[in-house]
Image: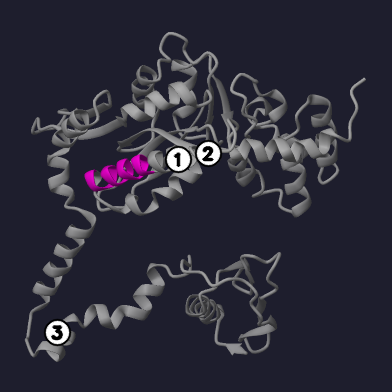
């Protein structure tokens, strides 16, 4: 197969993946060479390699294994905005002609445009009206969820003196009580961008429930991530989780190295243990030190449970590069992301902030909507999850949760091979 250029080759791969409902990844994805593999490359051998031919400047397929052995996907990252615009451009533009052909009625472009905005407003929410009613929403939450904390922050530091929305913090009564009575003393923090008309960031505090799964505790909408916004979020949370007097004593915090968060934790919760997500450290470090062997050694180092084993792993890692490889890694203080240095009070050995990543993907659709619509969708999802997990717990065959039971069984296979003397 011959293509005019790399752009045409990539476009063909994108069309193929969407139409066949398969998920593929492009690595490497360069101007002179592109290799595509199935995302489940360990089980599915589908792959294709194309590269630039020097004397003709055509993009030619050099190797191709056409058989897919994976399940069809209903979601595909390659079905992005550019792909939709390319394939549905005519249908979007020719709305007038479609109505004329079907109903015999002529309408103007302005009517089509207003109809589109009306539909999107109904689907995503009217952002102007919702910001105007943010106080009403806060009052409604307090009245329907007694004991909940809802704080609306505004500023009147404008030329006109009008109030400007700065942020809203929400911690439902059931969330705070459940965390205090039934969750371990470990919480993760993260901030993600809102994707609607009005930009901003959603800050979240996520705990771990009795089955070692994510448990939403509190969330807030702010303009952007700064030390000031994180400090405001922490002050509200400290009051709800009764952390003010202890200043975080006995608490473990996991974060993704967000701007301002580290400084806020050090200032407001100086007694808490602060961990950094090893996955984010790996993402930064691997930009310079790529390779599967280095990846394996990195994670072995992060998960090492005692210092002697840690030293052995750092020596193994040093063999895969000069001293610079270790210097670049230890720029991130190891006490924040290496398991060997973790406190044991939270009974949690996690080196990643998976609970926040799970929450972020769980509320993905809500992030495209206007503020009250988004917050209400999150609230409903949290309440439904509480009900589902409560019903699930009634079916446990033991006081020990299913995930904990499975972990104990797995570890027991190793324990029986050892003898204590």
Residue 238 screen position, x and y as percent: 39, 19
Which numbered disc, 3 or 2, marks the residue closer to the eye? 2
At label 3, counting other C-alpha atoms closer than 10 Å, the crowd grade (few under 14, some 14-19, many 20 or more) is some
What's drawn in magenta, residue-wise? 372-384
- Relative horizontal placement of residue 403, taking residue 78 as reference (left or right): right
Secondary structure of the residue carrying tag 2 is loop
Distance, label 2 to label 1, CA atoms, is 10 Å
Residue 366 screen position, x and y as percent: 33, 50
Residue 277 screen position, x and y as percent: 58, 36
Q: Is the Cβ of the residue at disc 2 closer than 8 Å to that at disc 1?
A: yes
Q: In this rendered view, identify the residue nearer to me: 353 or 5.
A: 353
- Tag 1 residue: 389
**First along the sequence among labels 2 and 1:** 2
In magenta segment, residue 381:
yes
Q: Quadrant of residue 30?
A: bottom right
**First along the sequence among labels 3 and 2:** 3
Residue 323 drawn above or below residue 283: above
Secondary structure of the residue carrying tag 1 is helix
User: Do we see residue 65 in this rendering?
Assistant: yes
* Quarter of the image where the N terminus is located: bottom right
Q: Is the Cβ of the residue at disc 3 closer than 8 Å to that at disc 1?
A: no
Which numbered disc, 3 or 1, marks the residue closer to the eye? 1
**First along the sequence among labels 3 and 1:** 3
Residue 136 drawn above or below residue 346: below
- Tag 2 residue: 213
Which numbered disc, 2 or 1, marks the residue closer to the eye? 1
In magenta segment, residue 349:
no
Q: Residue at x 19, y 80 (%)?
A: 95
Distance, label 3 to label 1, CA atoms, is 48 Å
Give the label on residue 99, or none.
Answer: 3
């Amino acid at each position: 197969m011959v293509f005019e250029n790399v752009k045409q080759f990539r476009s063909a791969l994108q069309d193929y993946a969407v139409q066949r409902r398969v998920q593929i990844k492009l690595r490497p994805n360069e101007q002179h060479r592109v290799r595509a593999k199935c995302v489940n490359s360990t089980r599915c051998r589908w792959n294709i390699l194309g590269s630039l031919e020097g004397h003709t400047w055509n993009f030619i397929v050099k190797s191709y294994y056409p058989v897919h052995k994976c399940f069809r996907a209903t979601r595909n990252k390659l079905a992005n905005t550019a792909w939709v615009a390319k394939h549905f451009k005519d249908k979007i533009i020719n709305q007038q002609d479609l109505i004329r052909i079907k109903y015999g009625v002529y309408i103007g472009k302005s009517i089509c445009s207003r109809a589109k905005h009306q539909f999107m407003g109904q689907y995503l929410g009217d952002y102007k009206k919702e910001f105007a009613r943010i106080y009403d929403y806060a009052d409604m939450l307090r009245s329907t969820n007694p004991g909940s904390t809802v704080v609306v922050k505004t500023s009147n530091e404008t030329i006109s003196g009008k109030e400007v929305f700065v942020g809203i913090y929400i911690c439902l009564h059931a969330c705070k009580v459940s965390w205090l009575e039934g969750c371990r003393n470990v919480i993760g923090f993260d901030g993600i961008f809102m994707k609607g008309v009005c930009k901003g960031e959603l800050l979240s505090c996520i705990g771990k429930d009795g089955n070692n799964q994510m448990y939403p505790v509190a969330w807030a909408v702010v303009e952007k991530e700064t030390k000031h916004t994180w400090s405001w979020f922490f002050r509200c949370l400290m009051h709800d989780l009764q952390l003010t007097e202890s200043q975080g004593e006995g608490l473990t915090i996991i974060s993704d190295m967000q701007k301002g968060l580290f400084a806020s934790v050090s200032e407001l919760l100086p007694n808490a243990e602060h961990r950094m997500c090893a996955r984010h450290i790996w993402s930064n470090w691997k930009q310079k030190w790529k390779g599967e062997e280095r990846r394996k050694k990195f994670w072995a180092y992060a998960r090492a449970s005692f210092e002697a084993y840690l030293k052995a792993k750092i020596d193994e890692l040093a063999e895969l590069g000069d001293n610079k490889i270790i210097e670049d890694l230890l720029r991130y203080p190891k006490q924040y992301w290496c398991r060997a240095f973790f406190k044991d009070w939270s009974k949690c050995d996690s080196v990643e902030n998976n609970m926040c990543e799970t929450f972020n993907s769980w509320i993905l659709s809500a992030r495209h909507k206007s503020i009250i619509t988004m917050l209400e969708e999150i609230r409903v999802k949290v309440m439904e999850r509480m009900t589902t997990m409560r019903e699930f717990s009634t079916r446990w065959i033991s006081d020990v949760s299913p995930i904990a039971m499975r972990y104990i069984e797995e570890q027991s296979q190793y324990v029986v091979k050892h003898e204590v003397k």
